[in-house]
Image (cartoon, grey):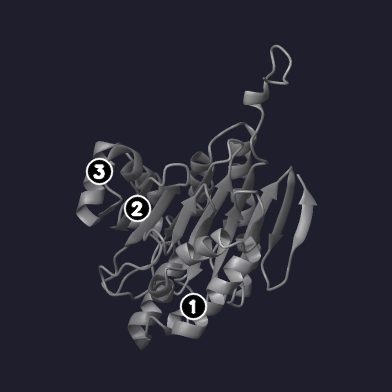
Amino acid sequence: MSCCPTGCQCANLPKANPVIVIHGGAWAIPDKLEVASREGVKNAARVGWEVLSKGGTAVDAVMEAVKVLENDPAFDAGRGSVLTHAGEVEMDALIMDGKTLDCGSVATVNNIKNPVVLARKVMEKTPHTLIVGEGANTLAKEEDVEEADKEYLVTAAGVEEWETYKKYNVAVSSLFAQRGHDTVGAVALDKGGNLACATSTGGITGKMPGRVGDSPLVGSGGYADNESGAVSTTGHGESITKVCLAHRVVQSLESGASPAQAADEGLKYMFDRVGGSGGAIVVDREGRFAAEFSTEKMPWAAITLGNMEHGFLPGERNKEQL
């Protein structure tokens, strides 16, 4: 027999305190991009939080937050993408719904303003999980996804970096200390207790055409499961793929680790096994979150209970009220 009074609204009460966490890529970010990177992730967090605070879904929140980052030329995703060895744009993105485990990804798309929007179309409008190249562009036209040309997507800095690459023939691995690895991502928990993740990247300068890293790969670039947590990763794509970093972090959560412990364990394992560095943002089903990285810098921001936390350097954790 229910102890609730007549007219009880218990069913309408939030099941969880919403959380949004953002990252802007784990790499050796130059000083000239520090302010823009810090502000960019904070802006994205505010947009995602606005969705959640109005009762929106975690999927909506991560998509809208990543769109902000894709529209910001400070980040290598959407506008701010870099050029392949052949001088073309190839972008990848992923989105995943932890409630159903539905997911959608696109890879090597070259004229889409917001790849994360197209990834969501794959998840919701097709029976597939990953569509690449020409097929992805065909879907974009069918679903009226906004397009953008190379002049919009690649900044002057991106062109200059590509010209430097072509002049000196710098290997992709060497560019990790420069630009080209700053994947962006978001994870969220909504009032209904549902989790989601999204990850997007504009590639690596000078990469082999057709190369796909971890970002659009479920279990590597991101993973979300209501029974455990949501993760978005960043860093050296091949290393992340080899250890399925996002799923490894989720498995640690399932084993009882906190978000910080799970992220740290995954990053340490990746370095020990394959010598790769990177970062991860994590939120678990209880609303606990973490932003951990093994690189020099990673801009991140999180909002919950009306308070923002953000950082950029190892160990940095600033707090402010909205």
What is the C-alpha distance between the residues marked 2 and 3? 12 Å
Frontmost of labels 1 and 3 is 1
Q: Quadrant for the N terminus, please.
A: top right
User: Which x, y percent locates residue 294?
Assistant: 59, 76
Identify which residue is drawn at 49% across, 42% down.
59
Numbered circle sitting on residue 139: 3
Query: Which residue is label 1 attached to?
Result: 270
In the displayed structure, does residue 6 sit left or right of residue 224? right
Looking at the rendered structure, the kind of residue marked 1 is: Met
Q: Is residue 128 above or below residue 206?
A: above
Total labels drawn: 3
Residue 67 higher or lower than 164, as above or below: above
Q: Which residue is mark 2?
A: 105
Q: Are marks 2 and 1 in contact (CB under 8 Å)?
A: no
- Between marks 2 and 1 in the image, the one whose residue lies nearer the viewer: 1
Which is more N-terminal, label 3 or label 2? 2
Residue 227: image x %, image y %? 52, 49
Q: Quadrant of residue 291?
A: bottom right
Foreground pick, 49 / 151: 49
Q: Residue furthest front?
A: 1
Are circles 1 and 3 on residues that touch, CB within 8 Å?
no
